[in-house]
Image (cartoon, rainbow, N blue to C red):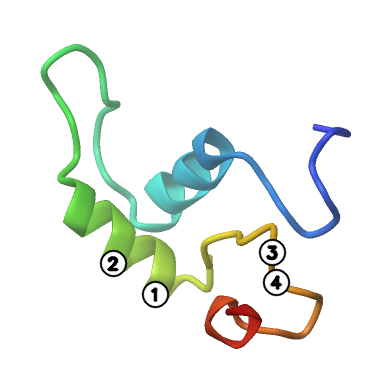
Amino acid sequence: QNWLPRRVMSAWRAAGIVHALERWPGHECGDAVTGVDKAWRAALAHGFRPYDAVAEPGQTPADAN
């Protein structure tokens, strides 16, 4: 993942980490999908934050606008 900026990771990697931290059984495959809201809340609870390419380091995306 050398193409991503520092302290940024791909969504699939973050999802795998959240999946393990939450100890969710099974894997998402075909029609078996974790609810988006459930996954989003869990990711935020574990410290993951959305990446905004416009924000400068130390800024929140709201500060950049």
Are dots 4 and 3 in contact, CB under 8 Å?
yes
Q: CA distance from mark 4 to mark 3?
A: 4 Å
Residue type marked 1:
Ala
Label 2 element class: helix
Residue 64, percent from left and from top: 64, 79
Q: Please tell me whether residue 9 is drawn above or below residue 43 in the rendered image.
A: above
In front here: 55 or 17? Answer: 55
Q: Which residue is mark 1?
A: 45
Q: Which residue is mark 3?
A: 54
Are dots 4 and 2 in contact, CB under 8 Å?
no
Label 4 element class: loop
On the picture, is 12 further left or further right than 27? right
Are dots 2 and 1 in contact, CB under 8 Å?
yes
Residue furthest front in the image: 65
Q: Is the residue marked by circle 3 packed among few (<14), some (14-19), or many (20+) residues within 10 Å?
A: few
Q: Quadrant of residue 3?
A: top right
On the picture, is 35 further left or further right than 11? left
Residue type marked 3:
Val
